[in-house]
Image: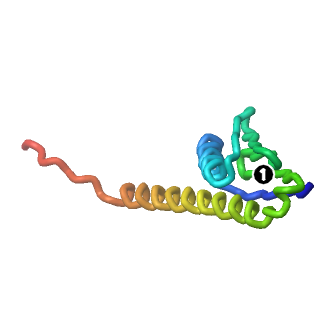
Amino acid sequence: MSHIHIRRAHHATLAKAKKMADQVAAKLAHDYELKSSWDGNTLHFNRSGVHGTLAVGAKDFAIDVELGLLMAAFKNPIQQAIETNLEKLIAQHEAKHEHAAKTAEKTADKPSAKKPGRK
């Protein structure tokens, strides 16, 4: 058996991190026909020759995958697909979070428009 272990930090809320995990699982399901199900904050996935977990923590993702004998030949492409998809989602979240923070900062810096009042 061959093993893949990946750990990546994130700065999302737990709920948003779980949504990112769902997106990774959807991509892997499409590419590798993996079936998945949640148990608390851990996404379990499998198919013939592959089983693993994606644990969503408050600050990071931990992915553990066991590949059977036949799937071990595909370890590198599978690992690269997981890393690429996860890093892409984390970067997208970071960019959205950064954009929202800048927008909020700009809004807070704008002087409020005064309404004409009666004298």
Residue 104 higher or lower than 80, as above or below: above
Q: Which residue is mark 1?
A: 62
SS for dot 1: strand
In the image shown, does 79 or 5 lie closer to the viewer? 79
Q: Position of residue 92 (x, y in %)?
A: 54, 60
Which residue does the image show at 85% across and 59% down from the upper left?
72
Residue 108 versus residue 66: which sits nearer the camera? 66
Q: Quadrant of the C terminus?
A: top left
- The amino acid type, in three-letter code, at marker 1 is Ala
Residue 12 seen in render = no
Q: Residue at x 70, y 62 (%)?
A: 83
Residue 118 lies, with reference to residue 67, above or below; the image says above
Q: How many marks?
A: 1
Task: Name, please, the residue furthest toward the left.
Answer: 119
- Left-right relation of 104 to 57: left
In this picture, residue 20 sits left or right of residue 40: left
